[in-house]
Image: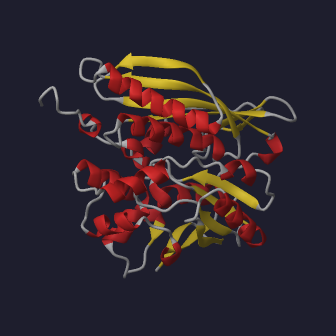
Amino acid sequence: MSQSEPIRLSSLAHGGGCGCKIAPGVLSDILKSVPFRLPDQLLAGNENNEDAAVYRLNSEQAIIATTDFFTPIVDDPYDFGRIAATNAISDVYAMGGQPIFALALLGMPINVLPLDVIRKITEGGQSVCAQAGIPIAGGHSIDTVEPIYGLVVLGLVHPDKLKRNNGAKVGDSLILGKPLGVGVLSAALKQQKLSAEGYAAMLRYTTMLNTPGIALSNMAGVHALTDVTGFGLAGHLLEMCRGAGVQGRVNWSDVPLIPQAVEFAKQKVVTGASGRNWQGYGAEVSLPDAMQDWQKNLLTDPQTSGGLLLACSPDAESEVLRLFKEQGFEDARKIGSVVEGRGIAVNL
């Protein structure tokens, strides 16, 4: 590579964005051997793969703590920083909380990347934190083989308004805030097949802060809340269903999809994480015989900075959708319902 040729950040990483998560089956085996004991003040921890830890400070306040970081999903350093920061902050919104400040996590191959490239990554992260109204108050950096960037994010929520991922009830509606397909678009980008239009769509969804989570915390009709990230829609819906002891019934025709991602998925342009996700939890997902491989790959597609996924009472459904639309989430829609049973069942 000549000195004048820009470095493709994605070429320095074996995986990108939330697609580089450890596979769900492997992660489950790792965590089985890790004993943990929850103090009474810990309102949410590791017991149901919650999006963040939540610790009660007093009767009016609980602190939310989360961290998320990954390798580049795009080549533009400023965009990489924006996407990573948006994704990290999302976990606070997914608990119904208000973010208050962040710490930066930075791992960079110092001898490979010019300092101005690294600076642009951090500037991208800072721009999103400013949009969320929070400062980056510090952080930690190391010299690594692959570029890594992310945040530790702290937030606040009223203990009685905390939204966990295990409260779904039979009869609830399932609502998804963003369309699926970010992982497919990232695979197309890595293969240098993604158009400018496709890149714009990818950037649009991965940098949309999941701010509706704050208002959703005030809705008694919202029973469970999470966000869709590296394990795909099926994986995160399964976590919700396992925690509540229910089944998620998904109407595939109602699931919002990024149009460009559909075209690439039909061409078998997918991430390796999609297959690993299916291997980890496919036994718990019932698919119709007519469902095609490209549809299954989108069901398990790892979403970097994906949408909020929630279970709410039918009476709250219109209010929830109105909230999403008011905050610019035009693709939000009901994708199914909660029924008695276990796992997930998909209808075409």
Seen in the picture, residue 118 relative to 27 is either above or below; the reply is: above
In this figure, which colouring scheme has been used for the structure?
A: secondary structure
Total labels drawn: 0
- Name the residue located 73 percent from the left edge and 54 percent from the top edge: 216
Q: Residue furthest front?
A: 4
Residue 102: image location, x then y, percent: 59, 28
**Residue that lies at the very extreme toward the left in this rendered image:** 2
In front of the other: 208 or 300: 208
Residue 40, percent from left and from top: 77, 33
Residue drawn where x is 73% and y is 30% of the image: 39
> Residue 158 is drawn in which quadrant?
top right
Residue 164 seen by the camera = no
- Is 160 placed above or below 135 here? below
Question: Which residue is pictured at 58% across the width and 66% down the height?
Answer: 342
Quadrant of residue 74 within the rendered picture: top left
Q: Residue furthest right?
A: 59
Residue appearing at x 64%, y 59% in the figure: 310
Q: Quadrant of the N terminus?
A: top left
Q: Is residue 96 above or below residue 196?
A: above
17 relative to 104 in the view: left or right: left
Q: Nearer the viewer, residue 218 or 166?
A: 218
Q: Is residue 85 left or right of residue 199?
A: right
For residue 25, say whether it is visible. Answer: yes
Residue 44 location (% of width, % of height):
68, 40
- Percent from the top left, x then y, of residue 19? 37, 46
